[in-house]
Image (tube, coloured by chain):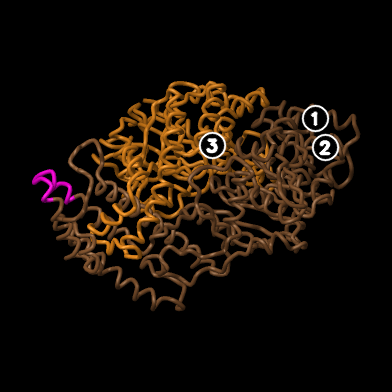
Chain colours: A orange, B brown
Amino acid sequence: MSRLQVVSGKGGTGKTTVAAALALALATEGKRTLLVEVEGRQGIAQLFETEALPYEERKIAVAPGGGEVYALAIDAELALLDYLQMFYKLGGAGRALKKLGAIDFATTIAPGVRDVLLTGKACEAVRRKDRAGRFVYDYVIMDAPPTGRITRFLNVNDEVAGLAKIGPIHNQAQAVMRVLKSSETAVHLVTLLEEMPVQETVDGIAELRAARLPVGRIVVNMVRPQVLDAADLELVRTVPRTALARSLSLAGLGGARRGGNAERLVDPLLEQAEEYAERYALEQEQRSVLGELGLPLHELPLLAEGMDLAGLYELATELRKQGMS
Amino acid sequence: MSPDAAQERNASQGRSDDQERADDQGRGHDLGGRGYDTHRRLAPAPVLAVDPLLDDPKTRIVVCCGSGGVGKTTTAAALGLRAAERGRKVVVLTIDPARRLAQSMGIDSLDNVPRRVKGTEGDGELHAMMLDMKRTFDEVVEAHADSDRAAAILANPFYQSLSAGFAGTQEYMAMEKLGQLRARDEWDLIIVDTPPSRSALDFLDAPKRLGSFLDGRLIRLLTAPAKLGGRAGMKFLNVGMSMMTGTLGKLLGGQLLKDVQTFVAAMDTTFGGFRTRADATYKLLQAPGTAFLVVAAPERDALREAAYFVERLAAERMPLAGLVLNRVHGSGADRLSAERALAAAENLEESRIVDQGDGKAGLRNSPDTYGSSDSPDASSSGSSASPSSDPSEPSDSAAEPSVEEVTAGLLRLHAERMRLLSREQRTRDRFTALHPEVAVAEVAALPGDVHDLAGLRDIGDRLADDRRELPEATA
């Protein structure tokens, strides 16, 4: 099992949720995981219902069996100052550089430097050991940028390495790239059973593969329960409306006569069934598209009550059951 | 029916009565606080009238913004088509459309030029283009530097990375392109989609950030050795500067720094242009002819971003027209609550189990028992739908679903829909409580994606249709 688990996905597919559930799942039974955020959106804090995360590793959850989940919101600017201090003892000069706009330049404008700092920090956590020589974190899970930008984000170290041909950024980039392209890393993509996210997943995998980045698994999120199967839908299409009205009436929903309460439910219920049938067919189509990718596929249910902390544990349990951790 | 289910059902019926009362009391009272906790309805948000906005000749620019995955690009395209078919000459600037959406407008070629979309109805015109950020950047350089200088810049490695990869280039170039399209004055309405950014605010911030970098102190310092030499008054900077370039050199590698310096020296003449243009675009966005539409879906994260956006636009004094809420679900049977639908489904399924145990007699009697005793409104109909005269299909073959089973399935489907509706309502109420003044246009959910003009037209109809079908409103 790779120790750096990168979770990406199209916007709106719930990649932060999946990353957090994975961090919980991997922490069960006494393991320690670090969940890192790189886009400054504070999605993790909102999910775990805590205040905004600082640039500091702190424990945010306990997993079943005594495991621990730590979280870190990586801030490129602070990571850079950290880095200057660590390697050059430039803590004071950092402030001067900031004043001149040099820090801003390095973290937002100089192409790729920002991404090297972010991925570099995650890789540092992956490799960090305690005094006894054991890894501090069993797994590091990254809530990464969306599918459309993930390859560029992870591969940008190559770009920087090409642009900065010597020097510490260059070396740093090379070292980070070695981790990212090894079996130590797995990049998972979260999708929905809808056309656009699936298409983006397919494209994203092709890009990752072309860049020789290790593709992990596909997680289909928010899968709606199957309420009616093909045989049911067939019957829905053929059954007389009067029979449905009678059946609804039997169920205690009012009169089956024309204009009765039960009878008036028939049309809207059939309309909803038709929409369901259409969606069901589309979902089957998208499932088979995903199936053709030949990657391990996991499905997480849509939580009826919306996402909350209890739901997160539920999804973590589901991921464990499905062998993702 | 299990005792639990019966209890739950009774409880739920009791609750819904209370709820209705709470509804009545809540209407017209304070909007704050507990609204979404109690399912109490807030005063509905004002309706965003889309057609008057699109028809108004004073509306020259519509900017669609919002977080990723909410249907921003589709909304922009649908608005463009609708405006064109209502007689305006429109251009839609998309940033990164899904392939099939782009194909639906015939703009799958990435040539950075607006193309007329064929197949629109009416007198207006629809043009569409997809942004090529590198090419747009190249054009800016070419427009502002003589050909030798331009060639030097375009060949510079730092420029090449900057134009293709910098985290804000796409945003900056989108705004640059908007400025260009507006300056050409060939269209009377420009609809812009915004890039899927790291944060929804990047397209406002990036131009300023890049502009101030290219025009800023750091650049002056970096270029100082080449340009300023021993000019008086700048000497004192040399010490700081050599420390600066020294540190940056250490950090980035000397060669990259040299690329940056060469780039900056070559770009020198165009710097003023950058800042001026960024400022001009920013002002254009604040101008009266511009309307911002925040696009969201009725989901927690998307609406949280939308609320953030609304606040930010207000702070920047950008004119907000309203919120487009995509993928809103409704139900024609919204008077039947999820709880009652589930209880009814259980009634039917119970009867089925009894049937399998005791034969058909069980089936015929049990639903009636539950139906007439538990449900008050069933009593009137009990006789006409008498189960004993029910020519119900043979229902004990395991493979073929019975009418009862299918009915139970339909009821479960309905329960799922009603849960979805109330979840959507809660998230919407949260937004409305924060921003009661923001007008909202709801777009009913479609089962599939949009692939052609007909699909876009359908979305446009849904956008402009301001009938309010509030899921929990009493019919």
In the displayed structure image, the side of residue A45 where residue B255 appears, left or right: right
Which mark identifies residue B154? 1
Check contact, mark 1 vs mark 3: CB within 8 A.
no
Q: Nearer the viewer, mark 1 or mark 3?
A: 1
Residue A21 in the image: x percent, y percent? 36, 41
Check contact, mark 3 vs mark 2: CB within 8 A.
no
Secondary structure under tag 3 reads helix
- Report if residue B106 is visible in the image: yes
Seen from the viewer's position, the closer of residues A57 and B89 is: B89
**Residue located beneath label 3 in the image:** A118
Check contact, mark 2 vs mark 1: CB within 8 A.
yes
Q: Amino acid at mark 3?
A: Leu
Seen from the viewer's position, the closer of residues A262 and B155 is: A262
Q: Nearer the viewer, mark 3 or mark 2?
A: 2
Seen from the viewer's position, the closer of residues A186 and A302 is: A302
**Residue located beneath label 2 in the image:** B141
Give the residues in magenta: B350-362
